[in-house]
Image: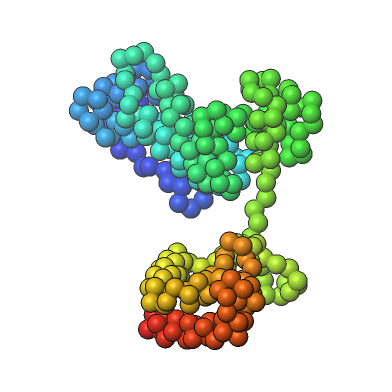
Amino acid sequence: MHDMTLPMPVPTLVGSLEQYLQSIARVPLLSAEEEIALGRRLRDHNDLQAAQRMILAHLRLVASIARQYHGYGLPYADLIQEGNVGLMKAVRRFDPERGVRLVSFAVHWIKAEIHEFILRNWRLVKIATTKAQRKLFFGLRSLKPGFAALSPRETLEVAQQLGVRPEDVSEMEVRLTGQDISLTPPSEEEDSRWVSPVAWLTDESATPIEALEQKEAEHRSQEGLQLALANLDERSRHIVAARWLQPETGSAATLHELARELGVSAERVRQIEVRALQKLKQALQPAV
């Protein structure tokens, strides 16, 4: 039996990954009896040295599981590091009295941490947001034969194996094979005719503050106009409204039409209009 009280150096991922893998491969495995004894020491006495011993003995398990996810475009060392976090959580929750070896209990926690890490760092935003999508995401990655697009027959086979609809498989495949697009041109030497996507995202409309200021200015102008119109006599107000304030119809009354309506000459209507507009301009001047 190995000496469980012997302090052991903790392998670190800082530096050479190959040295780390060689180091964890030399750590002795635990027998069932040793594992139970260490688990009880951790549970009953919060013995961190016992926890360290259990973690060290299972680091090679983490490396083995992390290797299965090496095809997601993320560094192997980072996958191992996240898996180690899952292993630590498993050791903390390990119950030595349940008759289950730590290796079986820890697999779930190791994979869960790696899955979360992959989903957080995958290039596409919201590639898998629900539990079903996550299952499909990892299932498709493991079942897809290569990087080429799935044929209709392969799509149907994958859908049947995963218990989902073929269209769900096709949608997830599009997400997996989508390419990143730079928002800015790669370099200043690029062809000037190349338009960067950042130009498509430019919002030329007013900012919220500018829009609010514009709305308030329009409101004040409307209030000022109504007050100015109220100071005109009824005939002048009618002429101005008929000539200039017809937003619904879009057609202003002519001088001759108003002349016939009011029983005066067209020239008289024009004179009234000019004086009324001058009064409105004077009344609205302070608000400008």
Q: Quadrant of residue 175?
A: top right
Front-most of residues 103 and 173: 173
Place of residue 239 in the rendered image (x, y in percent of width and height, measured from the top left): 53, 75
**How far across and how far down the image is residue 76, in percent?**
55, 44
* Viewer can see residue 82: yes
Which residue is at a point 21% across and 24% down the rendered structure image?
44
In the picture, measured across the screen, residue 244 lies left or right of residue 147, that is left
- The image shows residue 218 at horizontal and vertical percentages of 45, 70
Residue closest to the far front: 263
**Left-right relation of 35 to 278:** left
Would you identify the image quadrant in which residue 67 lies? top right
In which quadrant is the C terminus drawn?
Answer: bottom left
Q: Is residue 137 left or right of residue 207?
A: right
| Residue at image point 70% right, 33% down | 170
Instruction: Tell me if residue 213 can be seen.
Output: no
Pick the residue in front: 192 or 7: 192
What x and y, as percent, mark residue 279? 44, 84
Residue 185 in the figure: left or right of residue 19:
right
Between 134 and 271, the one lying in front of the other is 271
